[in-house]
Image (cartoon, helix red, strand yellow):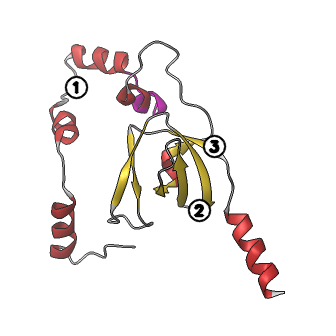
Amino acid sequence: MIILMMTMALSAQSSDTTLYVAVKTVELKASSGFFARSLGILSLGDPVTVEINEGKWLVVRNASGLQGWVPADAFSARRILSGGQGVSPSEFALAGKGFTGALERTLRSSGEYDYSGVDAMESRVISQGELHSFLREGRLAEGN
C-alpha cells in the first residue's frame, strides 16, 4: 500500500508537458535553491519538457538533453513567437506588462518623464557574491 501511494505521488509530480521560456533568459540549476550551481542558460522561446513539477520549481529537460531545476514562473504553456517582426526579448517582456517600446519612445520624447532612474536600474548588474554579502550583512535569510 505504501509503495502504491509513493508511486502515485511521484506520478502526480511528473507531467511530461512541453513549456516555453517566457523570459529573456533563465538559469538551469543543479537544485531548487536560488544560489544553486548553474548548469546552463535557457533563452526566450526555448521549448522544454517538464519532468517534475513541485509548484514553484520545475525539473525540465531542453532539446539537447540538459536537465535541471528552474522557477516555474519563467515559463508559458503557449509557444513564444515573434511573428516575424523581430521582437526583442525586452520588448516582449514590456508588452506582457502592457508597455511597448513605441509607448516608451513616445513618453521619453514628450519630456514629461525622467527615465534616468529606470536606465540606471536596468544597467546595474549584481553578482551572486554581492548578493551573498548583502544578505549576510543585513542578517537576511538566504532561503533554500
**Is 108 placed left or right of 70 in the picture?**
left
| Label 1 secondary element | loop
Q: Quadrant of residue 144?
A: bottom left
| Label 3 secondary element | strand
Query: Which stretch appears magenta?
Result: 93-100
Q: From what the image shows, is residue 94 above or below residue 133?
A: above
> Which is closer to the viewer, label 3 or label 2?
3
| Disc sitting over residue 99 in the figure | none
Q: CA distance from mark 3 to mark 2?
A: 16 Å
- Tell me what residue is drawn at x 38 percent, y 29 percent: 89
Badge 3 or badge 2: first in the primary sequence: 3
Q: Nearer the viewer, residue 73 or 15?
A: 15
Give the residue number, with chain letter if any, for mark 2. Answer: 55
* Place of residue 45 in the rendered image (x, y in percent of width and height, measured from the top left): 49, 33
Q: Which quadrant holds the N terminus? A: bottom right
Badge 1 or badge 3: first in the primary sequence: 3
Give the residue number, with chain letter if any, for mark 1. Answer: 113
- Tell me what residue is drawn at x 61 percent, y 60 percent: 53
Q: From what the image shows, is residue 102 above or below residue 52?
A: above
Q: CA distance from mark 2 to mark 1?
A: 39 Å
Q: From what the image shows, is residue 131 above or below residue 141?
A: above
Give the residue number, with chain letter if any, for mark 3. Answer: 18
* Place of residue 122 in the rendered image (x, y in percent of width and height, measured from the top left): 22, 38
> Which is closer to the viewer, label 2 or label 1?
2
